[in-house]
Amino acid sequence: MKSHFTPCLTLSVALVVLGAFNLSAADWGSLHGNNRSAPPAYHQQSQPSRAPEMNGAPAPAMRPEAVRTPESHPAVQPQRERPQQDVRADNHGAARPVMDRTPDREVDRRRMDIDEDRRQSYYWSDYHSGMRVDRLPDGYRRFHIHDHDYFYFGGVYYDSGPSGYEVCAPPVDADIPALPPGAEAIQVGDTVYYYAAGAFYVQQSDGSFIVVPTPLGVTVALLPPDATSVVVNGIGYFLADGVYYQPVMQGGVTAYLTIPAP
Amino acid sequence: MKLLKFIGCGLLVLATGCASAQDQTNLAPRADSVLRAACQFLQQTPAYSLNAEIWREHVDESGQKIQFSRTVTMDVKRPAGLRLEITSPNTARGFWYDGKTLTVLDRKHNFYGVTPMPATLDATVDTAHDQFGMDLPLIDLTLSDPYQNAMAQVTGGKYFGIAPVLGVLCHHLAFTQDNLDWQVWIEDGPQPLIRKFVITQKNEPGAPEFTALIMHWNVSDRVDDSDFAFSPPKGAAKVEMQEAGNSK
C-alpha cells in the first residue's frame, strides 16, 4: 500500500506555489492598480455564499446544514492504491505527457475577462460528455480505474464505446503526469487544487496529478464543458456531473461557486 | 554638542538636496511638463467620454505572448460618476458607479452584482481594487489627481519628441519605476489629450504589456447623471459580488 498524499505534502506544495507567486507582480491595466497591488495569492476561496436572485427578488438563504466545506468533502483519499495505468508508447503514439506545463504560472494571474478567449485555444474546450470520436488523438494515455478502461488526452477523458470512443466526465482517481492546459490553481485551506475542463486535481507526492471529487465552496472562472443551465425554486444554477455551480461576480467578472444541491 | 547637531542637520539637508537633484536628473523636464499639462487638463475637465481599444498581453506556458483585445467606452463625471463598457465578441461587461453603489453587469450571461461604494471616485477605485480585486482599464484617467497618481513611483522619465498616433501628432513620453515601465502619447495642441498608453510589466516573465489606444475623446458634451444609474436588463439575475480572496 502506497500513500500518494499527505497533509504535509499539501502544505508544502501550497507554500512552494505561494512562494513562487509572491515573487511576481500583478497584471493590471492601470498604473493605479499596479502601484497599489501587492500580488494576491491565487484564488483563495471563501465559504459558500448566497444563491443568485432574479431581478430584485431576494434569494432564499442556503440551508446551513446543507453547506459542506471542502474539508468535510474530502478531496483526497490518503493510503490509497494507485489505479493501474498503461502509458506504454505503443501504436497510439508517444507516452510522454502532452501539454506539459508548470502549474504555478497559472497561479500568477488575476481573475480577468480573458478566460473566455483563452479557453478557445485549449484542446478540451471543443469536447463535452457524450461526444463520440472514431479514434483517439495521438499521445493519448490509458487508465484502468475501478475495473474500467479510460483514455485521456489534453484534459479530455474518453470511455470506450461499441463503436469508437465517447467523451466522459473526468473519473475520480485518474492520474496524469502533467496538468491540462489552462489549469487554474485554487487554494482551500491547506489544499491546492488545480481546475481545468471541469476536473479538480491535486498534486501527488511523485509530482503527478490525480482527479479528486469536486470540492464544494470553491469558485472557478469557467464552467465545466458539460454544464447545463438549471432552475431550482426559480433560481438559476449550472449543473455538471452532479455538482451545482452558482454564478457570482468576482473581480468584476462572472465566476462560479460549487455548492451543495439546492 | 550644538555644533555637532548643526553639522548633522546640514549633512541631512545636503543629502536631501542631492536626492532631489538626482531625481531631477532622471526626469527630463520636458517629459514632466508635458505630462503635467495633460494631467492638469484632465483634472480640470469635469466630465468627459472616451472610446478606446485596449490590448492585454498574456504570456503562456511556452513563453508565447498572446494579445487579447477589448473595446472600452468610458463616461466620467467628477467627483462621483463612472460608466464603463468593456466589450469584445467573447465578453461584454458594464460598470455603473453613481456615488453610492457600483454595479457590474455581465451582458453575455445576463448576471449583475451590486455593492455599496464610497462617495468619491478616488475612494471607489481603491475599494474596487482592494476589496473586490477589480482590474479596471484606464482607471488612471478618472482619479482626481492624475499627475500625482502617475508620478507616485516614477524614478525617471524621458521625452522622445513628436510621433503620430492614429493620425494625431503626439508627444511621446516614457517613464520608468521599479515595478513597471510605461509610455504615454499626448496630443500636441491646445487640448493635451492622452491618445495612447502602454504599461510594461517588466518584472513579469515575458514582460507582458497593456496597451490602450484612445480613439475618441469628448470633453465638451454634457454627461447626464442618469447615465450612471443602472437599470437591470430584462431577465437579468442578480448575483453576489464576491470579495477578492486575499488579494490586496
Image (cartoon, rainbow, N blue to C red):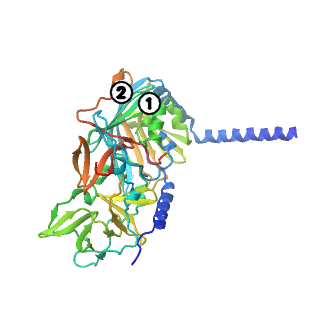
- Lower position in the chain sequence, tag 2 or tag 1: 1
* Mark 2 crowd level (few <14, some 14–19, many ≥20, 10 Å Cα): many
Residue B171: in sight, yes or no?
no
Q: Position of residue B191 (x, y in %)?
A: 43, 26
Q: Is residue A111 left or right of residue B176?
A: left
Q: What residue is shown with label 2?
A: B228
Between A201 and A92, the one lying in front of the other is A201
Please tell me whether mark 2 or mark 1 is closer to you in this view. Answer: 2
* Vertical arrangement, residue A129 with respect to residue A66, above or below: below
What quarter of the picture does the N terminus of chain B occupy?
A: top right
Q: Dot 1 lies on which element?
A: loop
**Residue B169 x/y as whole percent:** 40, 33
> Label 2 marks which chain's residue?
B
Residue type for callout 1? Asp
Q: Chain of mark 1?
A: B
How packed mark 1 is, by other alpha carbons closer than 10 Å (few <14, some 14-19, many 20 or more), is some
A151 and B50: which one is in front?
A151
The reply to whether residue A168 is in sight is: yes
Vertical position of residue B201 compared to residue A172: above or below: above
SS category of the residue bearing label 2:
helix
